[in-house]
Image (tube, coloured by chain):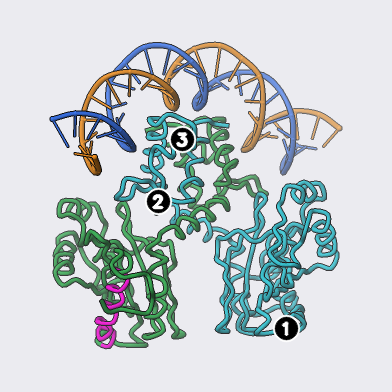
Chain colours: A cyan, B green, C orange, D blue
DNA sequence: CTGGAGTGTTGCAATCTCTGCAACCTTCAT
DNA sequence: ATGAAGGTTGCAGAGATTGCAACACTCCAG
């Protein structure tokens, strides 16, 4: 909508791939070098890009600091964290919190497993949207139309043999998840990792976030993990209650 | 340098303080509402701002994802991490990695203490620049002129009675740190927390990053913590060697 | 139900900013 | 020394951006 800003912002994902010099930036933006220079300068003044010693540009520190503040402002994260930590204490496994935003699902909090075998994931990292339990829950709650459009736009990488293969299968899965009110990912992302997920709802009843407990097969079987479902759902409901303002913000109670 | 982009980018720190509506943004930018709207729209298209259900704008998820990628591209972080983890295994305390960039010092990695008492800090958070051991090391390596200018510009909050009080004291401290090649923070940021820090140097001999081990008084006294200095320095040197390309990237060796 | 205040949104013309060019500078390698 | 490669600057024209004013929408009170 604003050409100049549009171009400037396009530089950011470009640099996210790795450092680049002026010429490369200009070429990929398809603008004159001098134009790219001035855009980079402006980004630089705001600390969003940094010029390293070899004169190449990369993303700057302020970007990281901004993202930091952005996360701290997501109040659902603050509310949820103590609950997630308590759940982790009870079951010992990795606990994740994720939100949906503009065609992406993002982990916004994580409590590490207490077992030595941990799974790879990182706060801020986009989630494997077609297979993760939290992603299914968040997408299942979208309005029908939006859900279909999104499902069509997605790609369906076959991480494993049990990954969701295509849009129709995904939509069926979402329908199921929608009805049962919880979701799983049994080896759909990594062969040996399973997870159980439950939705967190806001005051309007819409799914505002989703949480999950994940563990590798070597620690607990899928069946054993499923026995945690009630606990996970109770935790999610407790967060929902607090987030929607129904429960006073006092922690440690999960009844009405 | 570019007015439009400048204005657009100014919105980000503004939203970092908390969600704001169109009117508030326009007012703080000192532009017409329609202008602010179009800038916000452009930011929105790039996912840097998000419009929440109450129509107010806040920072968006893509910002978090970008920052994530930015950090992963800092190769010093990748190189250092296994060393930091090993150090943490050996001593059990919190280990930090920080870099300097444009008048700021930022934590870019952290390995949590294994003791129950942990300190508050977060990756991506700017460091208390006038007191932290890592900050002293990074600033001490700046060219004399730059160092003085920066020291003058800084503020010197008295977090505790032992915080660095003013620019002259800070410059003296930097001089000392520069000569001895390591630094400490003994209760300068939080009364009960001490840390020992060592520099990581690149191929050109300049300080490229700094690392530290921190622990609260209740776990180890300052004197005990200081006994870790040789270990911390050895770790830092090992990272330096690998980062500057002297040591082959094989981990687990810290001799020549 | 109606009126009005508060916000967000769009079309338009004037203007001011941004763009691309070309020349210049710096650095590095031959 | 000489040339090449990349970075930087001044300038005039082109075109994007701006602020305005009018319009849409929601919410609330009467």
Query: Within 10 angstroms of label 3, few (less than 14), some, or many (20 or more) residues?
Result: few
Q: Mark 2 points at which residue?
A: A60
Gap in Å between the C-alphas at discs 1 and 2? 43 Å
List the residue tagged with mark 1: A221
Looking at the image, tell me whether mark 1 or mark 3 is earlier in sequence order: 3
Mark-to-mark CA distance, 2 and 3: 21 Å
- Assign a secondary structure to mark 3: helix
Q: Which residue has dot 3 on it? A: A27
Q: Nearer the viewer, residue A100 or B56?
A: A100
Q: What stretch is highlighted in magenta?
A: B224-240
Give the x, y percent position of residue A98.
Answer: 64, 63
- SS type, badge 1: loop
Q: Which of marks 1 and 2 is in front?
A: 1
Of marks 2 and 3, which one's residue comes earlier in the chain? Answer: 3
Residue B67 - label: none
Residue A117 image-quadrant placement: bottom right
Q: Is mark 2 on a helix, strand or loop?
A: loop
Q: How far apart are marks 1 and 3 (CA)?
A: 52 Å
Earlier residue among tags 1 and 2: 2
Q: Indicate whether C17 appears above or below A222.
A: above
Circle 1 or circle 3, nearest the eye: 3
Q: Please state which of the two labelled residues, at mark 2 or mark 3, is closer to the viewer.
A: 3
Tag 1 and tag 2, C-beta contact below 8 Å: no
Magenta stretch contains residue B228: yes
């Amino acid at each position: 909508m604003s050409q100049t800003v549009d171009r400037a912002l396009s530089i950011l994902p470009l640099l996210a791939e790795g450092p680049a010099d002026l010429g490369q930036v200009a070429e990929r933006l398809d603008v004159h070098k001098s134009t790219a220079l001035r855009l980079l300068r402006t980004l630089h003044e705001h600390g969003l890009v940094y010029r390293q010693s070899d004169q190449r540009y990369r993303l700057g520190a302020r970007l990281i600091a901004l993202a930091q503040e952005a996360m701290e402002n997501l109040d659902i994260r603050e509310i949820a964290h103590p609950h997630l930590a308590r759940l982790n204490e009870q079951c010992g496994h990795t606990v994740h919190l994720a939100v949906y935003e503009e065609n992406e699902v993002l982990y916004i909090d994580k409590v590490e497993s207490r077992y030595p075998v941990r799974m790879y994931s990182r706060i801020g990292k986009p989630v494997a949207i077609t297979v993760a339990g939290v992603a299914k829950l968040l997408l299942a709650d979208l309005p029908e139309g939006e859900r279909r459009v999104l499902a069509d736009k997605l790609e369906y990488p076959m991480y494993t043999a049990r990954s969701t293969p295509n849009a129709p299968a995904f939509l069926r899965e979402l329908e199921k998840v929608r009805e049962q009110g919880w979701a799983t990912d049994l080896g759909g992302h990594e062969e040996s990792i399973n997870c159980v997920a439950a939705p967190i709802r806001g005051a309007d009843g819409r799914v505002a976030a989703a949480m999950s407990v994940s563990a590798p097969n070597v620690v607990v079987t899928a069946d054993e993990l499923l026995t945690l479902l009630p606990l996970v759902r109770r935790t999610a409901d407790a967060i929902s209650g607090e987030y929607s303002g129904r429960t006073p913000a006092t922690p440690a109670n999960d009844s009405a």
